[in-house]
Image: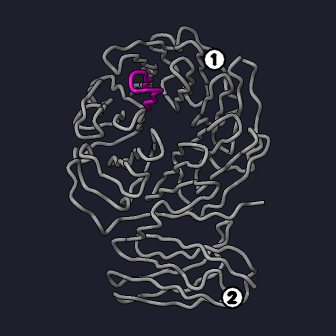
Amino acid sequence: MTKLHLAALVHLCLFTVAHPQGTHLLLLPPDNYVDVSFSDSLHGWIAGSTAIYRTTDGGNAWTRDSISTRGWRFYSVCSPSPSSAWLTCNGSSYNRLSRTTNGGSTWEDIRTFCSSCITNLSFNIVRCSDPLHLWVATSANPVGGASYLEHSTDGGQSWLFPNPLGAYDLYINSFASLAVASDSLVSAIFSYRFLYTTTNAGASWRKDTLPGLSRYNALAVRPADCVWVVGDSGKILRFGTDGAGYLPQRSGTTANLLSISALDTLNILVTGQQGTLLETTDGGSSWQRIAVPVAVNLNAVYFVNRNLAWIVGDSGVVMQYRNGMLSDAFEHARISQSFVLNHCYPNPFNPSTRISFYLNSGGFVRLEAYDVAGRLADILLQQNESTGSHVVEWTPSRLSSGVYFITLKMGSGVSFQKVVFIR
């Protein structure tokens, strides 16, 4: 049975204040968010395709980091401690691996590759187990270049090349994913179908060819336990780190899966296209789809601790998974540059509830209700509205009791409210 959850899609914020390291935000602006990393429940980073954001209070407020003003494109972020973070990005004619050790006050380029060189080497993903030990995946363009891993044990001062493919493999040149459980236990996917795992920091590697013709996009690895791999068409595989082969999982979906985070042996979250969010609490014996009324790609998920995970995606999606419930990461400050959707009253309700919203400027508005499966249940409003406050009364006489999501859409902005209808 599907759980009842609340999702929130957060767009441009109205309230900003000056901050020494950049712009201080209550909400995050619309961007395609590609990666998220937290060192603890308070300190974390979100990588958008065009900007980097940091929080020091568990996501109540965010700082747009100064590195975002350089016009670079960001690919991944890893934060091993409250003050340190690593980034992979492309900009100013160079592909870069950059590091901060002071919470984003300053950044330094640890490695750079020329973007216009004949062989264009790109830093794809950085993953770290602590501030000194990190792994970076690098691939080459054009086709026929190399893909390999770089390993540092001294914070990037020196590098090892424990390449599982051998030097410059001419056939496997596209890198898909990288996961680090410890400095010794590392797994990577190359060419979307070859899984490499080391348990001795790259001294030796085990190679597994992933089954079928599907692309495999992401993986997670747990110490002395197993490697999890997810891919297109709902594929989920579980490998033993001892080389015992794989066990296919029944995900219950055919959506393309994009990210996975494993808290421990039992608790795992998976995200994918079209708002797909899956959870297992029994080590993959069963998977449950969590209802998310946002049909966009959920690109990254990160378990912070047993009670908290963060999920980010396209079109400004930022969500928390806290204590088994998916919730608005910014419920305390529901502010939008174009509109504000207020709390519905009464809620729960029978037979009707009043939905109020405020428009900062006039325009075409859609007010809709969706059920927990993401299906359109009712259209409450679909017309041009003027600037100011508005109230709509909803009486769902033809609908059954249950949880519904009231959705306000205006331009590219979307906001959600959960309501409970009781007959």
Q: Secondary structure at mark 1?
A: strand
The image quadrant that residue 387 belongs to is bottom left
- Residue at image location 39% in from the left, 55% down from the top: 31
Q: Position of residue 289 (x, y in %)?
A: 70, 54
Q: Which residue is the site of mark 2?
A: 350
- Residue at image location 62% in from the left, 45% down from the top: 270
Instruction: Judge from the rendering whether residue 185 lies leftward or rightward of residue 101; answer left or right.
Output: right
Q: Position of residue 373 (x, y in %)?
A: 68, 66
Q: Quadrant of the N terminus?
A: bottom right
Q: Nearer the viewer, residue 244 or 17?
A: 17
Q: Which residues are magenta?
A: 125-136
Residue 34 drawn above or below residue 405: above
The image quadrant that residue 266 belongs to is top right
Q: Secondary structure at mark 2?
A: loop
Amino acid type shown at disc 2: Asn
Which tag, 1 or 2, sits closer to the chain's start? 1
Q: Nearer the viewer, residue 159 or 381?
A: 159
Q: Position of residue 55 (x, y in %)?
A: 37, 49
Residue 207's label in the rendered image is 1
Q: CA distance from mark 1 to mark 2?
A: 59 Å
